[in-house]
Amino acid sequence: MSYVDIHCHILPAVDDGARDLDESIDYARRLVDEGVREVVATPHVANPRFPLDPEEISDRVAALSAELHSREIPLRIHAGGELHPSDPNSLTDAQLELIANGPAGARWLLFEIPFAGVDQRYADNCRQLMARGFGLVIAHPERARGLFKDGGWELLRDLVAEGALLQINVCSLLGNNGLEAQEAAVGLLRSGYAFTLASDAHPGTRDHTAALGFALTLKAGASSLQAWRLTQANPRFLLRSGIPAGFNEQRAVTISRSLPVA
């Protein structure tokens, strides 16, 4: 197995993830032991609780990568960020580029779902970000309160039809975010709307991995092929190919189903 995790708070001492370098190193060793080969470091960005200049992220990733190399821990870390939903368009295009992934012309952002629920303001922010030339991977939509009860799903489904992709969390499948989030995650997985699964790990407090996610997707009713796509092929596709302009729901399903089996 060669897992890829696009949502991980592995950088030390920047947010509510790893508290220090030791926690980052210990978690990196565990990742490698469990078959995770690449992660995107996604510290909170534009989150009022965790002020962080996006320009710092690349240097912090380079420093952690150097530490891993010196300790012979073969884990590749990509610079990224988890963009907070409160005021994402306050960031300049240059700042967004610092936390985007994918090749030129297909760059994408990890955009956090609002826990209070998906509303028109969030949908408008998504469209504004896409209009600025960025694809979107929406982080843990299952954690939005009342997703399938309060009209949020209709708004989110329209965004998916326009090219946004959905990333569900390992901790949600575990039930750690409550029964509602667990059932929503399973529903997104079984319906095929989930494009990828990620750990959203916070080493030291929430230190599950994408490897556990593979087992949980099987337990939730996914085939071994779907579990492989969610935890390996699809996240790797996002890093290598990004979200091209004109991407939509049908192209996402077609690409997911056509990726070769390892």
Image (tube, rainbow, N blue to C red):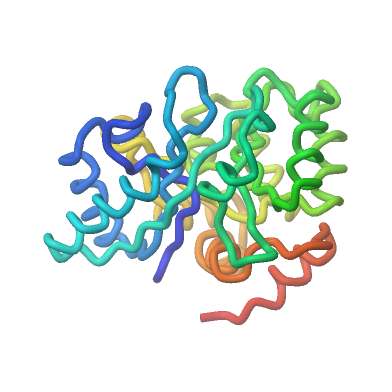
Identify which residue is drawn at 80% across, 66% down: 251
Please provide percent x and percent y for residue 125: 76, 32
- Residue at point 47% right, 29% down? 176
**Where is 181 relative to 40, above or below?**
above
Residue pictured at 43% horizontal, 23% vertical: 50
Vertical comparison of 217 with 49: above or below = below
Q: Is residue 117 left or right of residue 71?
A: right
**Number of callouts:** 0
Q: Residue furthest left?
A: 71
Q: Quadrant of the N terminus?
A: bottom left
| Between 102 and 202, the one nearer to me in the picture | 102
- Identify the residue at image location x=33%, y=50%: 61
For this rendering, which residue is in front, 12 or 29?
12
Question: Where, by quadrant of the figure, is residue 83 drawn?
Answer: top right
Determine whether, in the image, residue 253 is placed left or right of residue 85. right
* Horizontal relation, residue 198 to residue 108: left or right: left
Q: Does any portion of residue 156 appear in the rendered image?
A: yes
Which is more toward the observer, 59 or 188?
Answer: 59
User: Residue 79 in the image: x percent, y percent?
Assistant: 43, 52
Residue 219 place in picture, x, y as percent: 53, 51
Residue 227 visible in rendering: no
